[in-house]
């Protein structure tokens, strides 16, 4: 059996930044609160927990005083900064710089839209932490759409500013852009209503689509490794499955069913932007227990 790990898969720089920050504090202090899962990968969370990381939710965060808390790559809503200030919590802000920039951009456009009676629309998953943080910049007035079916939430006779959660699918984003344009024309005829769209999809993710498509093409079986909670993982798994129907989604080596393989298969191992390289290596090692791996 030939087993190839995709060297393009693995953490994006936003996640690397947050994990490095957490690790260096844990090495020094042996304990650190992190608000929410630092990365949507159970195995990596387990590893850091063993180093002393304590994952807390927003309920627990509100009760803390005079301590340190790390904010993960997805960013946080404005209330988190307010609570930290009131409770004398030192925030170690490991929000991804790309997400922080997007938060600022949405806040500015929201102010403009208010003057024009316009609407800020975010293409994303409504309960995703990044989207919650983005909506907070608009006083939670931004409309969240997950698909074309949700477009009825928009009033097409008023101005629209469209953004995207950083991990969304690029193709779908542009389909939404074109559909909004069409519906505005249908509603308003010749009268022009401002429509601005901002392609805020992170290229660390959107380029991975194409890279993964190439990687999956000439493999007999593909193992896609990702945490079950990762939306980026689900999306990229879909990309792989489309190119190669023999693609399996696994979160840990133990989920592998050896009946998926023949001894002379070429197997590809790849993953999401939240999948650690060490986990993909463990998956390869697991295959070695059953097959002779070249
Ligand atoms: S996917 Fe992009 S925006 Fe999201 S954390 Fe990674 S680098 Fe940042």
Image (cartoon, helix red, strand yellow):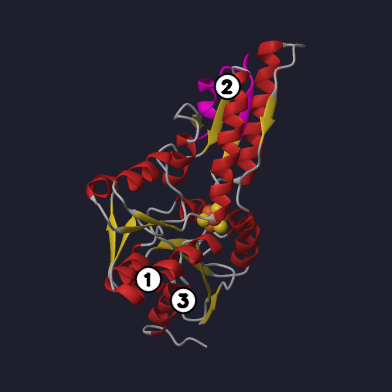
Residue extent of the magenta highlight: 145-162
Residue receiving disc 1: 25
Q: Residue at x 53, y 21 (%)?
A: 152
Using the image, tell me which numbered label, if any, was put on residue 114. 2
Using the image, tell me which numbered label, if any, was put on residue 262. 3
Is 86 drawn above or below residue 97 in the view shown? Answer: above
**Which marked residue is nearer to the observer: mark 1 or mark 3?**
1
Q: Quadrant of ligand 1?
A: bottom right
Secondary structure category for the residue under label 3: loop
At label 1, counting other C-alpha atoms closer than 10 Å, the crowd grade (few under 14, some 14-19, many 20 or more) is some
Is 30 drawn above or below residue 12 in the view shown? Answer: below
Q: Is mark 3 within 8 Å of ligand 1?
A: no
Which callout, 3 or 2, points at the residue further toward the start of the chain? 2
Which callout, 1 or 3, points at the residue further toward the start of the chain? 1
Counting from the top left corner in percent of width and height, residue 191 is at: 75, 11
110 or 283: nearer the viewer: 110
């Amino acid at each position: 059996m030939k087993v190839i790990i995709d060297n393009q898969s693995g953490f994006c720089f936003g996640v690397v930044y947050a994990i490095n920050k957490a690790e260096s504090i844990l090495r020094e202090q042996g304990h650190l609160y992190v608000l929410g899962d630092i990365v949507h990968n159970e195995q990596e969370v387990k590893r850091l927990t063993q180093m002393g990381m304590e994952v807390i939710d927003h309920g627990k965060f509100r009760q803390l005083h005079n301590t340190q808390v790390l904010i993960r790559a997805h960013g946080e809503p404005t209330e988190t900064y307010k609570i930290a200030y009131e409770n004398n919590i030192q925030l170690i802000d490991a929000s991804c710089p790309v997400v922080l920039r997007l938060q600022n951009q949405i806040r500015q456009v929201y102010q403009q839209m208010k003057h024009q009676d316009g609407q800020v629309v975010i293409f994303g998953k409504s309960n995703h932490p990044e989207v919650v943080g983005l909506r907070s910049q608009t006083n939670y007035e931004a409309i969240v759409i997950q698909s074309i079916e949700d477009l009825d939430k928009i009033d097409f006779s008023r101005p629209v500013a469209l953004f995207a959660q950083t991990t969304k699918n690029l193709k779908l984003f542009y389909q939404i852009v074109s559909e909004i344009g069409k519906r505005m024309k249908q509603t308003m005829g010749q009268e022009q209503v401002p429509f601005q769209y901002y392609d805020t999809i992170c290229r660390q993710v959107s380029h991975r689509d194409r890279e993964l498509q190439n990687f999956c093409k000439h493999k007999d079986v593909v193992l896609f490794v990702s945490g079950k909670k990762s939306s980026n993982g689900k999306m990229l798994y879909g990309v792989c499955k489309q190119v190669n129907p023999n693609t399996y989604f696994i979160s840990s080596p133990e989920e592998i069913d050896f009946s998926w393989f023949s001894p002379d298969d070429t197997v590809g191992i790849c993953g999401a932007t939240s999948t650690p390289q060490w986990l993909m290596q463990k998956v390869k090692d697991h295959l070695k227990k059953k097959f002779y791996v070249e």
